[in-house]
Image (cartoon, rainbow, N blue to C red):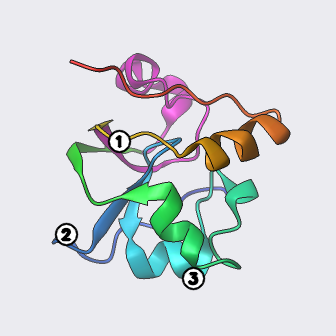
């Protein structure tokens, strides 16, 4: 696992959030480096996975420098992830295929709550 996630290089429509851990980066950053928390998705090797595992539809961004000591990170359930920028909420969920990838890697996936 990386020491910290890449910081988004832009803050426009090119931003995407990982559907599992909610890490926020640009499409190109996910394509080049993948997700630092969800390396098993292999987004950097299989570029179609960037679209399958991320979404441009999310609400809010929080930057967390030390998730292990942040009450906000605990509240958002990102305290075990690498430092980086995260969304407060995504409204989509991973496809069944990608949920199976999580299960095959013994990694928990919690779908977003429906409001």
- Mark 3 sits on what residue? 32
Q: Nearer the viewer, mark 2 or mark 1?
A: 1
Q: Mark 2: which secondary structure?
A: loop
Which residue appears at 51% of the width and 47% of the height?
83
Quadrant position of residue 11: bottom left
Which residue appears at 51% of the width and 44% of the height?
94
Rounded to the nearest angstrom, the CA distance separating label 2 from label 3 is 18 Å
Q: Is residue 1 visible to the viewer in this orientation of the structure? A: no
Question: In the image, which disc is placed on residue 11?
Answer: 2
10 Å crowding of disc 1: few (<14), some (14-19), many (20+): some
* Residue 69 drawn at (x, y percent): 50, 24
* Image quarter (top left, top right, bottom left or bottom right) of the C terminus: top left
Which residue appears at 56% of the width and 75% of the height?
48
Q: Is residue 43 visible to the viewer in this orientation of the structure? A: yes
Rounded to the nearest angstrom, the CA distance separating label 2 from label 1 is 20 Å
10 Å crowding of disc 3: few (<14), some (14-19), many (20+): some
From the viewer's perspective, tell me whether residue 47 is left or right of residue 107: left
- Mark 1 sits on what residue? 92
For the magenta stretch, what is the residue range?
A: 65-88
């Amino acid at each position: 696992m990386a020491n910290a996630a890449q910081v988004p290089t832009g803050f426009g429509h090119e931003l995407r959030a990982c559907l599992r851990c909610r890490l926020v980066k640009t499409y190109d950053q996910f394509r080049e480096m993948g997700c630092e928390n969800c390396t098993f998705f292999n987004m950097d090797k299989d570029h179609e996975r960037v679209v399958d595992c991320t979404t441009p539809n999310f609400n809010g961004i929080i930057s967390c420098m030390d998730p292990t000591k942040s009450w906000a990170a605990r509240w958002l359930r990102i305290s075990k992830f690498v430092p980086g920028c995260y969304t407060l909420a995504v409204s989509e969920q991973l496809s069944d295929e990608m949920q199976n990838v999580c299960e095959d890697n013994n990694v928990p996936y919690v779908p977003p709550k429906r409001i």
